[in-house]
Image (spheres, helix red, strand yellow):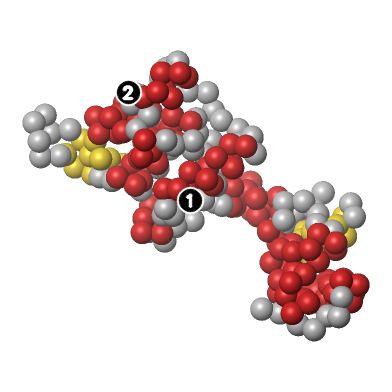
Amino acid sequence: MSLKAQLEAIIYAAETPISADQLFSLVRQSVLAEGAADNGEGKSRVRAALEELSADYAGQDHGIEIRQVAGGYRMSTKPEQHELVRGFAKSLKPPIRLSLPALETLAVIAYKQPVTVPEISEIRGVDSGGVIATLLDRKLITTGGRKQVIGRPILYKTTKEFLMRFGLKDVNELPSMEEFEKLVAESFQSELPIEAENQERVPEQNRADSHSPDLNVELSHRADSEDTVEHDADLKSSA
């Protein structure tokens, strides 16, 4: 991948303006591998590539530009496109914000589907019936028939909306449980807003003691997804 392509990808993904020094630290190894004699020459190559990249985006064929903002570089919508992008942003669905119990339940359904409420509750260690209504209302899950056992409990599975929200082609693209837990834990550390849920109130110590060892889920949402569209809209629009 060319240096310009690397810089372009990083600037696009960055939530805040990223400085030339930060960019160099991220591409340093590849720049030196391509022949830069030392860090000084490497930084010069990065700055030159940034200038070329900015010039490329300045052309009339691009609706976004690379601007220097607060000591760093960021992609933003060109002023003449602001109204168009604003109208598009207003048409978007609001980001999904779920409580930890809802996220835990959604994770169990995603990885174990089709699955019944008693099976979900057994895995989580607490009653999950109340949270199911929230997930159904958000169209993240749907019914998938009934299990052929005594009582014929309803089976639940994820929906097309779930795939769209999480940016997945199909459920086979779900990451491993370990990767999913890591991504979700990082999202919680980033202070993802959580909606209040009254469906279940269980003491934290009881919850911790009762978790199934193979699904000790400290979950939140990443999908782009959930924030993929919102993040892209924020990223590509300037003040």
Q: Is residue 233 above or below residue 200?
A: below
Q: 199 and 85: which one is in front?
A: 199
Residue 179 is tagged as: 1
Residue at mark 2? 127
Residue at position x 60%, y 33% from top?
A: 193
**What's the residue type where badge 2 is placed?**
Asp
Q: Secondary structure at mark 1?
A: helix
Q: What is the residue that sits farthest to the bottom in this orientation?
A: 35
Residue 35 is tagged as: none
Residue 150 in which image quadrant: top left
Residue at position x 59%, y 52% from top?
A: 229
Mark 1 surroundings: few (<14), some (14-19) or many (≥20) residues within 10 A: few
Q: Is residue 86 above or below residue 64?
A: above
- Residue 58 showing in the rendered view: no
Q: 62 and 212: which one is in front?
A: 212
Would residue 161 appear left or right of 11 to someone viewing this image?
left
Q: Secondary structure at mark 2?
A: loop
Image quadrant holding the N terminus, namely: bottom right
What x and y, as percent, mark residue 54?
83, 71
